[in-house]
Amino acid sequence: MPTLTARARGRSVVARLTVREKALERRMVRSLDQVEERLLVCVGEASGPILPGAVRHLVAAGGKRLRPLLTLLGAEFGDPGAAGVVDAAVVSELIHTASLHHDDVMDEALIRHGVASVNARWGNSVAVRSGNWLLVKAAQMSADLSREAVPLQAEASERLVRGQLRELVGPDHEGDRLQHYFEVVADKSASLISFSLRLGALQSGAPDGVDTALAQYGEHLGVAFQISDDLLDITAPSWQLGKEQGKDLAVGVAGLPVLLVLDAGRPQDEELRTLLSEPAGLDGARRGRALALLQRSEAMGQTEAVMAERLAAARAALAPLPRGAGRRALAALCDVVASRTE
């Protein structure tokens, strides 16, 4: 079953985070299994001729379940068995999946999690509406959680939309492209990672200040995670990614390596800059050439260095948190992001 793929991926990540932390590993695996079951129940509540299949499609296809895992790790700083912690983790995944529905429409993506994207299978209208349904479902569940859950979700959703719009519009004519990139990434990627950690901490009754420290960690980790996505989009084959290689190049979205090439003006990158300057994106042959040139460019090493800086900032943000298995797992997650292959 497709859901076993999500369980297997989740357990693989947990195992890497919980070396010598067997009690935490058992707790995380058990809770992630509950999240998986609850997710399928939630999307099973959709009704109508098309909606049930559309909202279940990406959930059943799997994914890394990173946001639910972060919610559960945030809960480690309070009572991880507190009522609503699993539902809080489900909320984070519902919002993330909704954002994938919308992103794939904007990017005209054909593949997600190794299967046809919702827009490719049912069309853009269904993809947008099914994404909206997932957001509504997440809001309904948030209303039954801690009093902070609804305003936190509203803030995260606002940032997601703002990031999507910023990416669509692009930087101002005189704007700094790199600054614009980091603003988009903070809103589109880091916001939900930060939200997931904070929601878990608050739902578990963690001490005052814990959620603030986790939010700072999440902001840096989220940016680093997106930078690793940018690198993988260039270096990893489609079968490994579970989506099209060079998807950003295909639709004219500039990741960090591309921006660094465009800004540097190195003579050896002249052909690459010409290819990357095409605003409408690149077709198959030109995309393949651009990928080959990017893989050999100095921008890849520069991008890895920026990612390492963000991960170091994430580790530093953990300093105010109580020492223990949860903090050690979050520190280990920085190493997992640095060595991602999918």
Image (cartoon, rainbow, N blue to C red):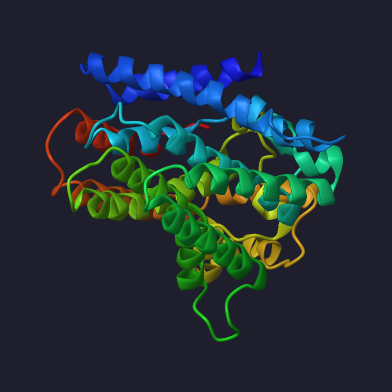
Give the percent coordinates (x, y) of residue 236.
Answer: 58, 35
Give the percent coordinates (x, y) of residue 280.
Answer: 77, 64
Left or right? Give the position of 174 relative to 30. Answer: right
Is residue 23 placed above or below 128 in the rendered structure?
A: above
Q: Nearer the viewer, residue 42 or 229?
A: 42
Give the percent coordinates (x, y) of residue 65.
Answer: 49, 32
Identify the residue at horizontal 27%, vertical 22% (top origin): 18
Q: Nearer the viewer, residue 99 or 236?
A: 99
Kindly indicate the quadrant of the structure image that contains residue 335. Answer: top left
Is residue 35 placed above or below 97 in the rendered structure?
A: above
Residue 292 in sight in this render: no
Q: Nearer the viewer, residue 326 or 332?
A: 326
- Count of all numbered marks drawn on residues in the image: 0
Kindly indicate the quadrant of the structure image that contains residue 52. Answer: top right
Quadrant into which the N terminus falls? top right
Residue 223 in sight in this render: yes
Identify the residue at horizontal 47%, vertical 54% (top origin): 153
Identify the residue at horizontal 35%, vertical 44% (top origin): 197
Give the percent coordinates (x, y) of residue 85.
Answer: 38, 33
Residue lying furthest bottom: 174
Is residue 126 placed above or below 14 in the rendered structure?
A: below
Left or right? Give the position of 308 relative to 67. Answer: left
